[in-house]
Amino acid sequence: MNHSTRLLRWLVPSIRQERDEWTALRSKSQQTEQIDREGESCLRLRNLYRELSQQNRELNISSPQRTLNQLQERVGVILQRCRLYLDSTPCHPLSQEQLPILERILNSVQEEQQYIRQQLLLTQTSLHYLKQLQEASQEIWTKPYCNPNYLLNLLRKIEIDDLHLRHPGELLFISLDDFVGVANLQFPGTDLTVYARGLETARLIHFVSRQHTEWQENRDLLLMAGLLHDFGWLMLKQEETDTTVDQNLSLAEQAEHPVVGAALLGGLRGFSGDSYLSEVVSQHHERLDGTGYPRRLHTHSLSEHSRRFAVICRFLELKNSRRELTGDGLRTYDIEEIAFAAALQLYREMKRSEWDETAVTQILSALDPDLQEELRLSDQQNDLFSLRRFQHYRRDEAHLHLKQPHIHPGSPSAVTRTLTDSQREP
């Protein structure tokens, strides 16, 4: 866990460096003489400590946001440790060499609090977008031809609001499930996960397109596909009547939802690249090596837009799927490592020729200029941080309802009889 890649966190601030600072702080406790606590440097740190403590108490985080609550509690623990040195009645002596260490610790606390505030702001803006997306997409369900103006207006608003964002942590949810939990409090009785995934996908596409001119061509196509790519799930849920769905039916739905969504969006016209929308949506789970679904398309069958969009969907799928990243409990990771874990898994799948190398490189460089080099080093050193992916073909619907063979263990003709060359049946 001491590998350098552990310090690369562009979705959640790093806390491991802060842990090392406490070790250094304790090691210098008896090395030099104590300083005057009324000096300028010490007073500045004490004022910063009081300010951060007050801000941490004022953070108002709702109960569904469990991850942010954990981060706030962790900040509180760090501030309690700082209280032993910076309180009005300190318990531990303070030397000159300890001052810069305490300053770095308080700076890490400040960074963590800033990230929590950014996530709270992201939640509030996304709730507003979520409601607008629901309203703007109503025509999709009721009309064979849907005017895209409402959806395009939402995309323009997101683009303007995100123009000042420079860090992935400002536009990607630390936990999609936590955000959906907050949204369910305001919009109960609706399936919001599909809309939340659409918003996060569209915002990441816009973030990458700002840094790579190649993504500017038909950007509206990718943004629209990002908003609506999982709408097939909503159609399948509406048609589902049996509440006791077995595992086979769930796998069939998984294979069907890109095609159902593509058919649903066939009438959405009136923006740049609209003729490719159904194609991109239907292929957002396809892979270059043919292991994707629903049609197991290979390299030559996938368009450039589909390749880019599929990589975006895969990265967010890994980031938001704790079950896949942990391998059903085979390994664990800290919350700060989730984005790096997703990027490393995507990088290794790219090396196995599952994803377009150019698209993966562009996305990783947009997220962090040094990210791909860190991933290369981790992969070179066979870092146990990643998962071993078991290659398999995803079953489609055609494989789920195969008829039994004419001879099977339950039929009379399956009874075996031992015959010799001299024996004949009567």
Image (tube, rainbow, N blue to C red):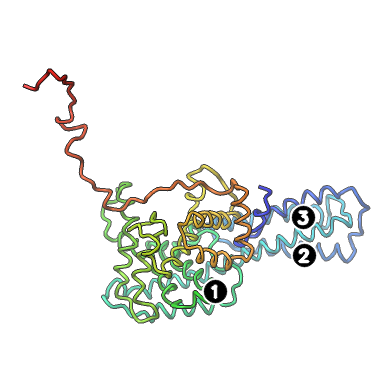
Residue 282 x/y as whole percent: 35, 65
| Residue that protrudes farthest toward the left in the picture | 426
Q: Nearer the viewer, residue 426 or 139?
A: 426
Q: What residue is drawn where x is 38% and y is 61%?
A: 191
Residue of label 2? 48
Which amino acid lies under the numbered mark 1 shown in the image of this protein? His
In front: label 1 or label 3: 1
Query: In the structure shown, which secondary structural element does the residue marked by tag 2 occupy?
Result: helix
Q: What residue is drawn where x is 74% and y is 62%?
A: 107
> How far is disc 1 from disc 2 in space, using C-alphas?
40 Å
Above or below, 2 relative to 130: above
Local packing at callout 3 (Cα closer than 10 Å; few below 14, some 14-19, many 20+) is: some
Answer whether labels 1 and 3 touch (C-beta < 8 Å).
Answer: no
Which amino acid lies under the numbered mark 2 shown in the image of this protein? Leu
Among numbered discs 1 and 3, the one appearing first in the sequence: 3
Res. 17 image quadrant:
bottom right
Residue 126 x/y as whole percent: 49, 69
